[in-house]
Amino acid sequence: MRILVAAALAAAWLALVGEARVAQAQPRAIRGGFGGPVPPGVAPAASSDVKPPDKDEPIVEVPRGPVVELGPKHLRMHLLDGSVISGDLSISEVEVETSFGKLVVPIDKIRSLRPGLDSNPKLLAHIEGLIKGLSDDDYKTREQAHKDLAAMGVKIRNELQRFAADENAEIKRHVGEILKELEEQSEQQADDDPSAVEQAWIRLDTLVTTEFTVTGKVSPQAFQISSKYGPLTIQLGDIKEGERQTAVRESLRRNITIDGSNIAQRSFKSSGIRVQAGDKISIKADGSVVMSPWGSNAAASPDGAPNYGWYVPNQIPGGALVARIGDKGTVFKVGRQSTFVAKNSGVLQLAIGMQAEYANEGYQYPGQYQVKLRVDPK
């Protein structure tokens, strides 16, 4: 009898040990019967103390140099070859021949000047030559003309549209394909940076003044400008755009990555940019993060989703990209895209909001959000 009791006790002890080992081997989070997460049996408590941001990025200040007062005849010229020249023009006014008559515009009333293709006959002839090359008998010549036109970008859209219904089948086909390519290119530019979307060239010159915009033929056809390199003569046809410099300071841009370790309750990721109250901040984000407590097939975008719980109840869903300014700044949702004005000064920080019970170190969130930042100083 004693032997039987001892054997029974040994078997019970082995069973208990086995159950303990199985429990230890269980994953920390499994899917519940209704698709929601089941908290692990033994998990570290979520910390209520938010750690300081990661110091991966060196802190930089947004440029805020003093604005230099410029003279009434001062313009900045962006040339077609990519160079930029600033200085005072030798003339005090320009003339614009329009379909309604001639206008005389003082230089100090000009906001911007964009010469049309009629002011650059060489460029216009080059474009028309490439379009004509789309119907060449030689296949390689046609394909090269197609590539060269597409490489010129959205700027030549208007010229291509003149040939969208051309009698020549090859020209019509190629032009249609290029226009589709340029449309996709324009949409991509708009997604990346709306301010970088290029304008299509027109035949006439465009002059924007402080009171109105006018198109026509600008004269003179050449300008003498007094620059820091001495007096220079610039042909109207060599100018991509002329503009009057204002008190606007340059923007600061930066790309950073927010990954699954940057959970808001654990540690924010420093952008490395110190902003001031009144600065305009634009953020765009893309990517995905695996929401492990809900299973390996669950993923969140920068917008987050309520079915992954709430970081802030009924305001910021789990998985959402969030931000704050300074270590003690109020946390707010950014999502895929956000533009806002800084209410206080400090380093801009980013993280991923998560429901409290799933924010502890026991959970891992593979993936990352790619974030594009732009700060326009006040």
Image (spheres, rainbow, N blue to C red):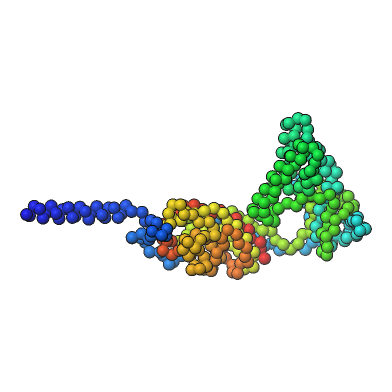
| Residue occupying the point 58% across, 58% down | 336
- Pick the residue in front: 90 or 301: 301
Viewer-nearest residue: 233 or 216? 216
Instruction: Note whether 206 is above or below 211 in the view shown.
Output: above
Q: Where residue 242 appears, x then y in whole percent?
A: 80, 54
Image: 137 above or below 314 = above
- Residue lying furthest right: 101
Residue 109 visible in the displayed image: yes
Judging depth in this view, the residue of 259 and 141 nearest the camera is 141
Residue 279 lies left or right of residue 16; in this view the side is: right
Quadrant the N terminus occupies = bottom left
Residue situated in front as seen by the camera: 98 or 54: 98
Name the residue at 11% across, 54% down.
6
- Residue situated furthest top in the rendering: 138
The quarter of the rendered structure image containing the C terminus is bottom right
Q: Is residue 358 left or right of residue 345?
A: left
Query: Can residue 227 be seen?
Result: no
Q: Quadrant of residue 16?
A: bottom left
What residue is drawn where x is 80% and y is 45%? 162
Residue 22 % position (x, y) = 29, 53
Q: Quadrant of residue 163?
A: top right
| Residue 217 locus on image (x, y percent) | 88, 52
Q: Give the number of callouts.
A: 0
Quarter where residue 339 is shown: bottom right
Q: Position of residue 306 (x, y in %)?
A: 49, 63
Q: Residue at x 50, y 68 (%)?
A: 314
Question: In the shown orientation, is residue 75 left or right of residue 183?
Answer: right
